[in-house]
Image (cartoon, helix red, strand yellow):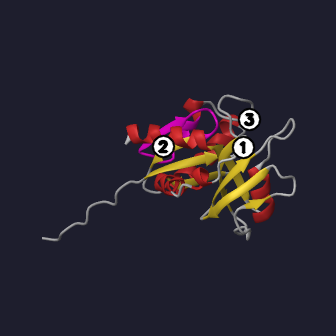
Amino acid sequence: MTRREPPPEVVMHVVFYRNLNLGHAGSPNREQLEDALNRGGASHVRSFQTNGTVLLKAEDPERVVAEAAGELVAMAGYDDAAIVRPLADLERVLAIGVFEKHQSPRTYRETVTFFQGGKEPSWSTPWTNPKDDVDVLHIGNGIALSLIRKPRNSAGSPTFEVERATGGVATTRTRGSIDRLLTAAATWK
Protein backbone atom coordinates (compact mmCIF):
# COMPACT_ATOMS: atom_id res chain seq x y z
CA MET A 1 0.00 0.00 0.00
CA THR A 2 1.10 3.49 -0.76
CA ARG A 3 0.93 5.82 2.17
CA ARG A 4 -0.76 9.10 1.35
CA GLU A 5 0.39 12.31 2.90
CA PRO A 6 -2.31 14.22 4.77
CA PRO A 7 -3.48 17.37 3.02
CA PRO A 8 -1.71 20.55 4.14
CA GLU A 9 -3.35 22.38 7.02
CA VAL A 10 -5.40 25.30 5.82
CA VAL A 11 -4.05 28.34 7.66
CA MET A 12 -6.20 31.36 8.41
CA HIS A 13 -5.25 34.50 6.51
CA VAL A 14 -6.46 38.07 6.54
CA VAL A 15 -7.13 40.08 3.40
CA PHE A 16 -6.71 43.83 3.79
CA TYR A 17 -8.45 45.59 0.92
CA ARG A 18 -7.24 49.10 0.22
CA ASN A 19 -9.90 51.84 0.01
CA LEU A 20 -12.81 49.43 0.33
CA ASN A 21 -15.81 50.48 2.42
CA LEU A 22 -18.59 47.91 2.33
CA GLY A 23 -21.74 49.19 0.67
CA HIS A 24 -20.28 52.53 -0.42
CA ALA A 25 -20.06 53.63 -4.04
CA GLY A 26 -17.24 51.77 -5.79
CA SER A 27 -17.17 49.01 -3.16
CA PRO A 28 -19.09 45.74 -2.84
CA ASN A 29 -21.47 45.07 0.02
CA ARG A 30 -20.62 42.35 2.57
CA GLU A 31 -22.53 39.59 0.78
CA GLN A 32 -20.95 40.39 -2.60
CA LEU A 33 -17.45 40.41 -1.11
CA GLU A 34 -17.87 37.16 0.80
CA ASP A 35 -19.58 35.42 -2.13
CA ALA A 36 -16.84 36.47 -4.58
CA LEU A 37 -14.16 35.04 -2.27
CA ASN A 38 -16.13 31.83 -1.74
CA ARG A 39 -16.52 31.40 -5.49
CA GLY A 40 -12.80 32.12 -5.82
CA GLY A 41 -12.11 28.97 -3.81
CA ALA A 42 -12.08 29.92 -0.12
CA SER A 43 -13.32 27.27 2.31
CA HIS A 44 -14.38 29.89 4.89
CA VAL A 45 -14.85 33.66 4.59
CA ARG A 46 -15.83 36.22 7.19
CA SER A 47 -15.84 39.92 6.49
CA PHE A 48 -14.82 41.87 9.56
CA GLN A 49 -16.14 45.39 10.20
CA THR A 50 -16.81 47.52 7.10
CA ASN A 51 -13.28 48.59 6.19
CA GLY A 52 -12.36 45.81 3.76
CA THR A 53 -10.81 43.41 6.26
CA VAL A 54 -11.64 39.73 5.68
CA LEU A 55 -10.76 36.54 7.56
CA LEU A 56 -10.15 33.78 5.04
CA LYS A 57 -9.35 30.08 4.99
CA ALA A 58 -8.06 28.74 1.70
CA GLU A 59 -5.29 26.47 0.48
CA ASP A 60 -4.05 29.27 -1.81
CA PRO A 61 -5.38 32.59 -0.47
CA GLU A 62 -3.51 34.72 -3.03
CA ARG A 63 -5.18 32.79 -5.86
CA VAL A 64 -8.60 33.12 -4.19
CA VAL A 65 -8.20 36.89 -3.92
CA ALA A 66 -7.01 37.11 -7.54
CA GLU A 67 -9.99 35.01 -8.71
CA ALA A 68 -12.43 37.26 -6.82
CA ALA A 69 -10.87 40.50 -8.12
CA GLY A 70 -12.53 40.44 -11.55
CA GLU A 71 -15.91 39.77 -10.01
CA LEU A 72 -15.51 42.71 -7.58
CA VAL A 73 -14.75 45.00 -10.54
CA ALA A 74 -17.76 43.71 -12.51
CA MET A 75 -20.30 43.90 -9.69
CA ALA A 76 -19.17 46.99 -7.78
CA GLY A 77 -16.43 48.74 -9.73
CA TYR A 78 -13.89 47.95 -7.01
CA ASP A 79 -10.36 47.79 -8.46
CA ASP A 80 -7.72 48.42 -5.81
CA ALA A 81 -5.08 46.45 -3.94
CA ALA A 82 -5.69 43.50 -1.66
CA ILE A 83 -2.89 42.56 0.72
CA VAL A 84 -2.96 39.02 2.12
CA ARG A 85 -1.20 38.09 5.37
CA PRO A 86 -1.26 34.97 7.54
CA LEU A 87 -3.13 35.66 10.76
CA ALA A 88 -0.09 34.42 12.67
CA ASP A 89 1.95 37.35 11.29
CA LEU A 90 -0.39 39.79 13.04
CA GLU A 91 -0.21 37.88 16.30
CA ARG A 92 3.58 37.75 16.07
CA VAL A 93 4.13 41.43 15.30
CA LEU A 94 1.83 42.64 18.08
CA ALA A 95 3.50 40.28 20.55
CA ILE A 96 6.74 42.25 20.12
CA GLY A 97 5.22 44.85 22.47
CA VAL A 98 6.36 47.89 20.48
CA PHE A 99 3.31 50.01 21.31
CA GLU A 100 3.68 49.36 25.02
CA LYS A 101 7.27 50.65 24.89
CA HIS A 102 6.28 53.94 23.19
CA GLN A 103 3.41 55.37 25.20
CA SER A 104 2.89 59.09 24.66
CA PRO A 105 0.09 61.54 25.53
CA ARG A 106 0.55 63.01 22.03
CA THR A 107 -0.61 59.78 20.36
CA TYR A 108 -3.90 59.96 18.48
CA ARG A 109 -3.90 56.34 17.23
CA GLU A 110 -1.69 53.26 17.22
CA THR A 111 -1.72 51.82 13.69
CA VAL A 112 -0.69 48.76 11.72
CA THR A 113 0.14 49.32 8.04
CA PHE A 114 0.36 46.46 5.55
CA PHE A 115 2.32 47.00 2.35
CA GLN A 116 3.51 45.19 -0.75
CA GLY A 117 5.43 45.97 -3.89
CA GLY A 118 8.33 48.33 -4.21
CA LYS A 119 11.15 48.16 -1.70
CA GLU A 120 11.37 47.86 2.06
CA PRO A 121 11.84 51.29 3.67
CA SER A 122 15.36 51.86 4.94
CA TRP A 123 14.32 53.91 7.95
CA SER A 124 16.04 53.41 11.27
CA THR A 125 13.22 52.96 13.74
CA PRO A 126 11.76 54.77 15.45
CA TRP A 127 11.44 57.14 12.48
CA THR A 128 9.44 60.39 12.54
CA ASN A 129 8.18 62.03 9.37
CA PRO A 130 9.03 65.69 8.63
CA LYS A 131 5.50 66.83 9.61
CA ASP A 132 5.99 65.22 13.06
CA ASP A 133 2.62 63.47 12.86
CA VAL A 134 3.78 59.86 12.19
CA ASP A 135 6.27 57.78 14.17
CA VAL A 136 7.11 54.44 12.56
CA LEU A 137 8.19 52.26 15.49
CA HIS A 138 8.81 48.94 13.76
CA ILE A 139 8.94 47.83 10.15
CA GLY A 140 9.54 44.44 8.59
CA ASN A 141 8.04 41.76 6.38
CA GLY A 142 5.49 44.13 4.86
CA ILE A 143 4.14 45.41 8.18
CA ALA A 144 4.78 48.78 9.83
CA LEU A 145 3.70 49.67 13.38
CA SER A 146 3.19 53.40 13.87
CA LEU A 147 1.89 56.07 16.17
CA ILE A 148 0.00 58.93 14.59
CA ARG A 149 -0.76 62.36 15.94
CA LYS A 150 -3.50 64.79 15.03
CA PRO A 151 -1.92 68.20 15.63
CA ARG A 152 -4.68 70.12 13.83
CA ASN A 153 -7.66 68.94 11.82
CA SER A 154 -6.09 65.93 10.13
CA ALA A 155 -4.15 62.98 11.48
CA GLY A 156 -0.84 61.73 10.17
CA SER A 157 -0.94 59.07 7.45
CA PRO A 158 1.35 56.07 7.77
CA THR A 159 -0.17 54.77 4.52
CA PHE A 160 1.12 57.83 2.67
CA GLU A 161 4.55 57.63 4.29
CA VAL A 162 4.98 53.91 3.57
CA GLU A 163 3.76 54.21 -0.03
CA ARG A 164 6.09 57.13 -0.64
CA ALA A 165 9.07 55.23 0.80
CA THR A 166 8.36 51.89 -0.90
CA GLY A 167 6.82 52.85 -4.23
CA GLY A 168 4.29 50.08 -3.52
CA VAL A 169 0.78 50.05 -2.08
CA ALA A 170 -0.27 50.11 1.56
CA THR A 171 -3.34 50.11 3.74
CA THR A 172 -3.63 50.89 7.44
CA ARG A 173 -5.83 49.70 10.30
CA THR A 174 -5.87 50.89 13.90
CA ARG A 175 -4.40 48.65 16.54
CA GLY A 176 -7.85 48.46 18.10
CA SER A 177 -9.24 47.02 14.86
CA ILE A 178 -6.43 44.46 14.73
CA ASP A 179 -6.99 43.50 18.38
CA ARG A 180 -10.73 43.01 17.70
CA LEU A 181 -9.89 41.02 14.55
CA LEU A 182 -7.62 38.67 16.51
CA THR A 183 -10.33 38.18 19.14
CA ALA A 184 -12.91 37.40 16.44
CA ALA A 185 -10.52 35.00 14.70
CA ALA A 186 -9.93 33.10 17.95
CA THR A 187 -13.65 32.39 18.25
CA TRP A 188 -13.94 31.49 14.56
CA LYS A 189 -11.16 28.88 14.43
| Residue at 25% from the left image edge and 66% from the top image edge | 5
**Disc 1 from disc 2: Cα separation:** 23 Å
Q: Is residue 52 magenta?
A: yes
Question: Is label 3 or label 2 in front?
Answer: 2
Describe residue 144's horizontal placement relative to residue 91 as left or right: right
The mark that comes first in sequence, 1 or 2, is 1
Identify which amino acid the numbered label 2 is placed on: Leu
**Disc 1 from disc 3: Cα separation:** 32 Å
Give x and y (percent) for residue 177. 58, 39
Tag of residue 57 = none
Give x and y (percent) for residue 132. 83, 52
| Residue at 49% from the left image edge and 37% from the top image edge | 46
Magenta segment range? 33-53
Pick the residue in front: 17 or 28. Answer: 17
Quadrant showing the C terminus: top left
Give x and y (percent) for residue 76. 69, 35
Give x and y (percent) for residue 162. 75, 58
Tag of residue 107 = 1
| Residue at 58% from the left image edge and 46% from the top image edge | 68
Tag 1, which secondary structure?
loop
Pick the residue in front: 18 or 106. Answer: 106
Q: Is residue 169 magenta?
A: no
Q: Which residue is mark 2?
A: 182
Quadrant showing the N terminus: bottom left
Identify which amino acid the numbered label 1 is placed on: Thr
| Residue at 53% from the left image edge and 36% from the top image edge | 47
Tag of residue 26 = 3
